[in-house]
Amino acid sequence: MAFTGKATYTAGVNLPELAEDVADLIGIISPYETPLLDALGDAMREATSTHHDWLEDELLPNKDMVDDASIANPLTEGSFDVANGSRFRIGDQIQVEGSAELMLVTAVAGDTLTVVRGYAGTTSEELMDGQVINIIGNAALEGDNKPATRFTNRIRCGNYTQIFTAAVEVSGTDAAASQLGLLDELDYQKQERLRELVRDLENTVINGGQPSANPQGASEVRRTMKGIIAHLATHIYRPGDDGFPTGTGLDEEKLNFVLRRVWEASSGKVDLIVVNGFQKRRINGFIAANRSFGPADATYRDKVDYYESDFGICRIVTSRWIPQDAVLMLDSSRVSVLPLAGRSFHFKPLATSGDYECGELIGEYTLELKNEAAHGLIRGLATY
């Protein structure tokens, strides 16, 4: 027999007789994590101008390339052209990459070298256009005069600051009324807008770019910082590039290819690998074939937090803001996110002209990325 007495539902769908039951807690459902900024940490200094500069220098190069398509006798040719003759001196021992033959430079005329082939008892090997030449070192004559002075010029690199803002405005009535889950509506709105600005800062640090004209800003031009991806030029690789491992799926061969190239070309030491969720799962898969569990194991683990190779130990950071087809490899000691002095994120109360409270959250930041050749990027990876 159906119940015919008084019940909670007899008043209808609006339940006017019942006390309201609302959890005194507000849940944020949108993603706002900033794992890359967390991994980099706070900068040890501030920028002091809207254009932040830093100086970089490099050692004299000890590599060059054969640039001579007219070599007639590859095994005996004693004179040939190189791409940059200024890198060589009389007395240099040189060696073609991949060859056991040593050569001694006896004359340098512009970009033309004269050498002793098969030096120090080594056997002559074929010399071909396009081969890489390693300069082993120079042997000076005893009592000889000093050699010609050689040096490198420092270069100035820089980036502009970008202003991040968000407005907050709450009516006098809303500020006075009791709110579920909070004590102060204005303070809550500040927190929400700050989460959004910090999220956007990380996204800009990764993906941001500068305007091609008037990067310093103008009345109609917004000043924007150049992000990490826009800074990189030397070590960017895609499937299909000459020498890069084949296939579009991320694997250890591709990671180690880039790590080795960065190690060979710079003094950098990659210690952060930043990926999105899809490529993180591919990295987790590196250990799938070797994973084992004991009879008493009750937890299934399928996660790689660090990748250790011959070229260093890399922490894996998963960021939502990395492009799906990309893997970013960073030397974190050369990456900093700097606020302009006195302009880290803060709230600035503004005058009102009515029954409300208002203000603006403001922050001005720039990215300092030193030695772009110390970092690497893979693009064009499969995302399915």
Image (tube, helix red, strand yellow):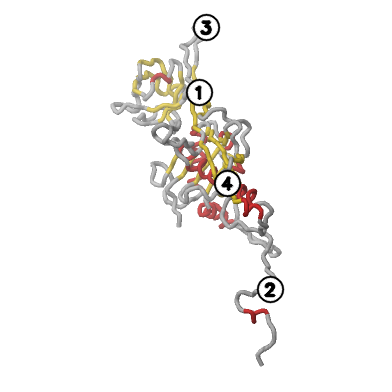
Where residue 113 sits: x, y (%)?
Answer: 37, 19
Disc on the earlier residue, 2 or 1: 2
Foreground: disc 1 or disc 3 = 1
Q: Residues within 10 Å of mark 2 (few under 14, many from 20)?
A: few
Amino acid type indicated by mark 3: Gly
Q: Which residue in the protein does label 4 denote?
A: 354
Where is 35 relative to 140, above or below? below
Earlier residue among tags 2 and 4: 2
Query: Residue type at mark 4?
Result: Gly
**Which numbered mark, 3 or 4, is in the foreground of this view?**
4
Task: From the image, tell me which residue sits under label 1.
Answer: 59
- Of the 4 image quadrants, the one containing the N terminus is bottom right
The percent coordinates of residue 178 (x first, y second) are 68, 57
Q: Which quadrant holds the C terminus?
A: bottom left
Q: Does the image show residue 33?
A: no
Q: Nearer the viewer, mark 2 or mark 3?
A: 2
